[in-house]
Image: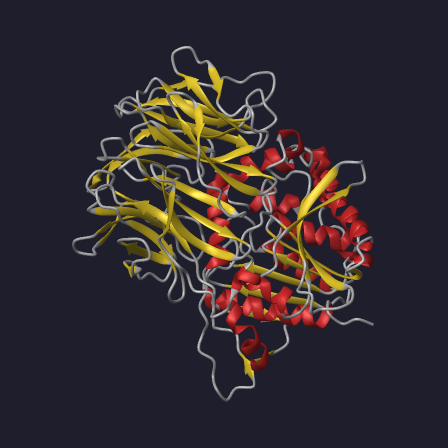
């Protein structure tokens, strides 16, 4: 779940394209899909200044071919990322798809590899449909109903079926379906479910059972076994005195157990083995006091590759499943590693890797020689990125003595004096800021001399399940107080300017930026809200039905009168009269998570204060902008906003 979330987050950072600019125009106009209010004209000189920083590309591993040593990747050459084929390390990236919406989750048929299955939505709606792409002809076939929300398929061991979830029956329940992608008419409902938190994880080696996760919240989930003929189910992990969370699971090669990631009897997510007969759980990474966030089992079942999240840094490990001992792997650069996938040869481990000084690219590790091979070398806009700012781990004490941490990027030494600061708060709220490639945000550092600070307030993942629970329900505003303590800390830093601070964030981070603007408005210069929540009650009532109950567990149930009163009281919309510093609100019309109404109502209300409000809305986007012309204009306008409201130094 988290690696998927991390995958989705990196897509927005690494893909770009620059639109054609009219040579004689003095300003750069927004495209027809953008609604712009209050934003001044963007000078062409600004566009030219930032252009190089919009040209970063990146690549993500999608799927190994089951027979040949080649792969599918996702990268972008034009407007949006597409599926490409790479036939050897650093080989040509052959583009296979040419859609107007970004495809995702491409996966080869796992025995012959003559086709692959992928997903795609329209306009950021997240109502994904599954498709088959035939390599011999280039033909694309729709596999799902074209209307409901569908998860990507999980391949059977034999490679003749996929299992996936779909909301087609009720619009909110994730029912489980089985299908042979070669024959879409074979699609059949395996079992009806209740709720939107059901996800297929794996097939048993004999394809008689499915491993399914029931997600309740970031702190609570359950594992089930489903019979693939009858749909009958059995619960593997009954509810105990304390909730337990599972981050993933796969069958062992002999089918007698499961390799799972769980915080069972632990503060952190450990890799473990769950015996199916006795239900005994055997921890495999007891000595590692950090979360295991991603893992992959080799086809022969002899090796387990896994990644730990150690203070935000990804560390790759390799485990011998017979001896349960770690094997030696080469030390990789500090950064992020995700998307682990073994080739069918049981020798090559593929993954995507990125760091502050390297955009996302695809690599493979030969575990027999420990040789690392690079498969893609993505463009960097013609810039030498090897000297970009590295992340520093910062820590500060919050209002209750709790230590909070984040990553600080300082601008180059050429900028003298105290530097203005952008505080960028992650979404989720169960997410985590990590030291990956900043992409176009490097412009703020290198050209504007602005320091960037990415806090991990209470409620963030990566620091144990107790820390993760500290912002739930009635504790919601404690995370906002963590930013108040951060403002105190900034004032103690000799090279940071506490009088020039801008706060921003996306999704839940958008709520945080609005909340900070209401509570600490006298201590910031401006705020930027990207697809953020402005009122928890209206958000919970209007977010898509399939995710409503899942969000109520985190934020509280607005149908309870006491909780409704509390949620209204702490919502930025209720306290909008306190927002007196310039505000920039950015949203997508088709957002299924945080509906557009959240942006419209905060814009209308804050404008009544006489506060400068900029508003940017894309009619062809959802929960954040994905299409590069839209992303570019958002960036140009954001740079303009920073220049006008953050940089001036009285």
Residue 217 in sight: yes
Given residues 395 and 316, the one toward you in this image is: 316
What residue is shown at x 26% (from left), y 30% (from top)? 157
Residue 387: x and y, percent? 57, 62
User: Could you say which quadrant of the image residue 159 lies in?
Assistant: top left
Given residues 495 and 7, the one toward you in this image is: 495
Whether residue 514 is situated above or below residue 328 in the rendered picture: below
Question: Seen from this angle, which residue lies furthest left?
Answer: 136
- State the count of labels: 0
Horizontal relation, residue 417 to residue 106: left or right:
right
Given residues 644 and 87, the one toward you in this image is: 87
Residue 625: x and y, percent? 50, 59
Residue 247: x and y, percent? 49, 31
What residue is shown at x 37% (from left), y 30% (from top)? 303
Question: Seen from this angle, which residue lies furthest front?
Answer: 369
Residue 293: x and y, percent? 50, 36
Whether residue 164 is situated above or below residue 591 in the rendered picture: above
Q: Which quadrant is the C terminus positioned in?
A: bottom right
User: Could you say which quadrant of the image residue 644 lies in?
Assistant: bottom right
């Amino acid at each position: 779940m988290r690696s998927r979330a991390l995958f989705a987050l990196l897509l927005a950072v690494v893909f770009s394209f620059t639109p054609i600019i009219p040579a004689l125009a003095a300003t750069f106009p927004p495209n027809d899909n953008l609604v712009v209010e209050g934003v001044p004209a963007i000078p062409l000189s600004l566009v030219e200044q930032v252009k190089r920083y919009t040209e970063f590309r990146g690549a993500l591993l999608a799927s190994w071919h089951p027979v040949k040593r080649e792969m599918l990747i996702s990268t972008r050459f034009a407007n949006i990322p597409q599926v490409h084929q790479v036939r050897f390390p650093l080989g040509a990236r052959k583009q296979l798809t040419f859609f107007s919406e970004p495809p995702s989750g491409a996966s080869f048929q796992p025995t012959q590899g003559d086709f692959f299955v992928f997903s795609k939505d329209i306009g950021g709606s997240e109502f994904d449909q599954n498709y088959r792409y035939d390599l011999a002809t280039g033909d694309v076939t729709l596999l799902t109903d074209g209307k409901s929300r569908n998860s990507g398929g999980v391949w059977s061991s034999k490679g003749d079926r996929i299992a996936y979830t779909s909301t087609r029956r009720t619009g909110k329940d994730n029912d489980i379906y089985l299908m042979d992608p070669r024959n879409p008419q074979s699609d059949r409902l395996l079992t009806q479910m209740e709720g939107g938190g059901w996800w297929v994880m794996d097939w048993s080696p004999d394809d008689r059972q499915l491993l399914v996760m029931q997600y309740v919240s970031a702190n609570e989930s359950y594992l089930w076994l489903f019979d693939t003929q009858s749909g009958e189910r059995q619960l593997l992990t009954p509810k105990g005195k304390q909730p337990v969370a599972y981050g993933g699971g796969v069958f062992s090669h002999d089918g007698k157990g499961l390799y799972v990631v769980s915080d069972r009897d632990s503060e952190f997510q450990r890799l473990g083995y769950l015996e199916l007969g006795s239900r005994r759980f055997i921890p495999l990474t007891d000595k590692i006091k950090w979360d295991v966030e991603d893992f992959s089992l080799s086809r022969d079942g002899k090796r387990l590759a896994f990644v730990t999240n150690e203070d935000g840094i990804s560390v790759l490990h390799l485990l011998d499943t017979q001896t349960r001992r770690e094997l030696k792997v080469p030390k990789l650069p500090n950064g992020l590693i995700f998307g682990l996938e073994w080739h069918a040869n049981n020798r090559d481990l593929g993954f995507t890797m990125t760091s502050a000084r390297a955009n996302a690219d695809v690599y493979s590790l030969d575990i027999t020689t420990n040789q690392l091979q690079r498969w893609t070398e993505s463009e960097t806009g013609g810039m030498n990125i090897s000297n970009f700012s590295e992340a520093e781990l910062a820590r500060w004490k919050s209002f209750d003595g709790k230590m909070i941490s984040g990553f600080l990027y300082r601008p180059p030494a050429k900028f003298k004096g105290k530097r203005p600061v952008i505080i960028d708060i992650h979404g989720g709220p169960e997410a985590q800021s990590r030291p990956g490639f900043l992409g176009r945000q490097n412009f703020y550092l290198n050209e504007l001399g602005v320091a960037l600070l990415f806090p991990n307030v209470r409620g963030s993942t990566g620091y144990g399940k107790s820390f993760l629970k500290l912002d739930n329900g009635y504790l919601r505003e404690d995370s906002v107080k963590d930013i108040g303590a951060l403002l105190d800390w900034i004032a103690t830093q000799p090279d940071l300017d506490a009088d020039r601070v801008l706060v921003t964030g996306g999704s839940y981070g958008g709520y945080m930026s609005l909340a900070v603007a209401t509570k600490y408005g006298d201590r910031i210069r401006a705020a930027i809200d990207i697809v953020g929540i402005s009122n928890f009650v209206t958000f919970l009532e209007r977010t898509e039905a399939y995710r409503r109950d899942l969000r109520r567990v985190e934020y509280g149930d607005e149908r309870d009168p006491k909780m409704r009163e509390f949620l209204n009281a702490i919502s930025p919309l209720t306290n909008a009269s306190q927002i007196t510093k310039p505000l920039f609100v950015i949203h997508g019309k088709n957002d299924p998570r945080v509906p557009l109404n959240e942006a419209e109502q905060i814009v209308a209300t804050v404008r009544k204060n006489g506060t400068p409000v900029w508003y940017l809305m894309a009619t062809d986007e959802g929960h954040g902008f994905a299409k590069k012309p839209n992303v570019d204009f958002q960036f140009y306008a954001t740079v303009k906003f920073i220049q006008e409201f953050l940089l001036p130094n009285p």
